[in-house]
Image (cartoon, rainbow, N blue to C red):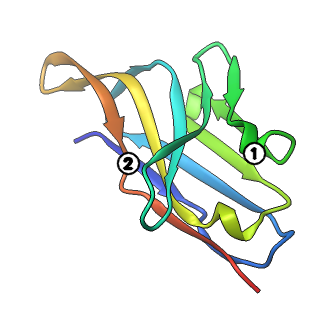
Amino acid sequence: QVQLVESGGGLVQPGGSLRLSCEASGRIFSLNAMGWYRQAPGKQRELVATITSGGTTTLADSVKGRFTISRDNAKNTVYLQMNSLKPEDTAVYYCNADRLVYYRGGARVTDYDYWGQGTQVTVSS
């Protein structure tokens, strides 16, 4: 079974840092672009950052200069380094793979818009 497993969330004071990780586990053949999204209580899910398989990144305006997205293709893992955290960064953070190719049995399967279960980030004093 293939999963996107997020880790690294938690409680941090304003101005602090956290590093989120998302590992695609299972018999992965390839991952295309991956991204981080977040959803605060009562709000819609929003894009935070994306990174292509070649390393091209995009960041939401609200996190530019504070967050960095990176990936290790050999480990099928994407990271989100979050610095200078603010209370308004509080949300559940979700990892996404826009196209995931993996082996199930003897077959190669392609799935689109694959999501992790989310990890809570709380910024509070």
Q: Is residue 19 left or right of residue 14?
A: left
Please provide percent x and percent y for residue 9.
Answer: 59, 66
Q: Extreme bottom residue here?
A: 125
At mark 1, the secondary structure is: helix
**Residue at left 78%, top 79%?**
13
Q: Position of residue 84 (x, y in %)?
A: 85, 60
Left-right relation of 115 to 66: left
**Residue at the farthest front position:** 42
Distance between mark 2 and mark 1 Cα atoms = 21 Å
User: Residue at left 52%, top 52%?
Assistant: 38
Characterize the local packing of mark 2: few (<14), some (14-19) or many (20 or more) Cα atoms within 10 angstroms.
some
Where is residue 125 shown, x and y percent of the image?
77, 86
Q: Nearer the viewer, residue 40 or 52?
A: 40
Is residue 102 something that shows in the picture? yes
- Residue 7 lies, in percent from the top left, at 53, 60
First in sequence: mark 2 or mark 1? 1
Residue beneath label 1, please?
63
Q: Is residue 84 above or below residue 107?
A: below
Using residue 17 as the reference point, say whether residue 22 is left or right of it.
Answer: left
Task: Check whether the beta carbons of the residues at disc 2 and disc 1 lie within 8 A of each other.
Answer: no
Three-letter code, disc 1:
Val
The residue that disc 2 covers is 116
